[in-house]
Image (cartoon, rainbow, N blue to C red):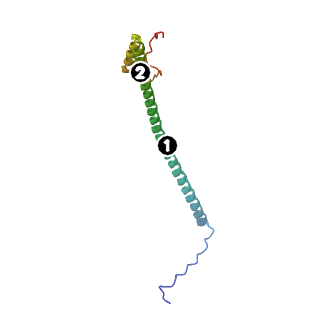
Amino acid sequence: MDDMSAKPQPQPQLPLAADATGAAGSARKTRSAFTRQLQLTVTVLVAVALAFVLYAASEKGIDRANLQRYQSYLLADELRQSSDDLTRMARSYVVTLDPQYKQYYQHILDCSRAPRATTTFTGTWCCKAKSRPAR
């Protein structure tokens, strides 16, 4: 047979003596295992903290979008209410020819053109007349 094709024989290992060097090697292995576990734990903790920060940032974005959606809803509802009130006053004026309805109509227009408070919403036309005419 060829020397190149022959497999090398494994060398027999000698047993370690139970002296101070053997105990130190065992402590070194234990310490390195502890260090690896500690590094793994710290890495996982940092990853969880980073994920929480990203989650909190996305929640703030969602909250801003929801607030904007709600404000848009309020503005659309105010526009609808104002349009309904203007239509009602115009129809009432046409049917009765009572000048009070014309004044109400103009008053609603004046209120819709006036600067609006950002925090108040009455649900009806902004400046209600003190008294409505009897029917």
**Residue 16: where, in percent of width, then height?**
60, 71
The residue under the point 62% across, 67% down is 19
Which amino acid, by three-letter code, is at mark 2? Thr
Query: Vertical placement of 57 versus 18: above or below?
Result: above
- State how many labels appear: 2
For mark 1, what is the residue?
Answer: 55
The residue under the point 39% across, 10% down is 99
Q: Quadrant of residue 21?
A: bottom right
Q: Quadrant of residue 78?
A: top left
SS for tag 1?
helix
For mark 2, what is the residue?
Answer: 87
Closer to the camera, 111 or 51? 111
The residue under the point 60% across, 65% down is 20
**Residue 104: where, in percent of width, then height?**
41, 14
Circle number at residue 97: none
Determine the residue located farthest toward the bottom in the rendered image. 1
**Residue 13: where, in percent of width, then height?**
58, 75
